Amino acid sequence: METPTAPPVPRPAGPARAEVPITTTSPVKKERRWSVAALCVVLATVAGLGAAAAVTSASDRTKVLAVARDVPAGQPLTAADLTVAEVSADAALTPVPAAQKVSVVGKRTAVELRKGGLLTTSQLTAGSGLGDDKQQVGVQVKRGQAPAGTLAPGDKVLAVTTPAQGEQSTGSGKAEAPPSTVDAVVVTVSRPDASGNVVVNLAVTPSDGPLLATRASQGRIAIVRQPRSS
């Protein structure tokens, strides 16, 4: 015998309700989003400041003259001795502006210039800077008659007259007379030739110029460098 089934209970009529999905935002994700946003703001600010600093730095830079190679004291400057460098404007620096290159070419150096340094007007002189009020005599010095590789412009030296042929001591027992010397200042020194000889330009007083030139033409001059002041 079958058991009777109860009829279904009807649901009350009414508008259907939509199911709303429930989403949950993790606090960690929110913090990450804020961190990324803050980082972007910081990077944008830094980039802006960097660009502004670059523009400011570029506008403050100026073109000046620098030394392209070593130049001894007393030498006239050539265009090849100079190059153009860009430096930041600084009141403590007084380099020669690059626009004045033409006017400084031909001037002589009052001091030795080193490659890579900035050129200043105090390093230049209208004259040679070495014995401009004196006579200059070129003396060819043989190997062994001058300190090898140590003479430099500005050095004080003695130009010593060496004996001529037949003037050497005869062994008679007489005291040998002291050598004749001339006080001089080195203006320039040439590079040694194939034989090791160099030409030294010396500045001397007008009274010693003719005598030194005469003895130099006879090859009777040796150079003694005086002690350099500390």
Image: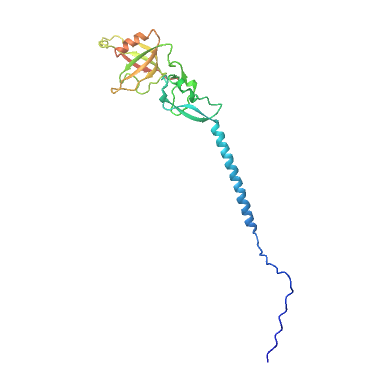
Considering depth in this image, is 205 or 51 the residue closer to the camera? Answer: 51
Q: On screen, 97 above or below 45?
A: above
* Residue 17 horizontal/vertical position (percent): 70, 68
* The quadrant where residue 25 appears: bottom right
Q: Is residue 218 left or right of residue 42?
A: left
Quadrant in the picture for residue 60: top right
Q: Quadrant of residue 175?
A: top left
Q: Residue at (55%, 32%) from the top-left corner?
A: 59
Viewer-nearest residue: 64 or 5: 5
Q: Is residue 26 left or right of residue 201?
A: right
Kindly identify the residue that appears in the image at 38 percent across and 19 percent down. 188
**Count of numbered labels shown in the rendering:** 0
Residue 36, compared with residue 179, is above or below; it is: below
Residue farthest to the bottom, as pictured = 1
Q: Is residue 16 above or below residue 38?
A: below
Query: In the rendered view, does 125 fall on the left or right side of 218?
Result: right
Residue 164: x %, y % from top left: 28, 11
Q: Where does residue 119 sit, x and y in percent of width and height?
A: 47, 24
State the scheme by which the image is colored.
rainbow
Q: Quadrant of the N terminus?
A: bottom right
Which residue sits at x=58%, y=37%?
A: 52
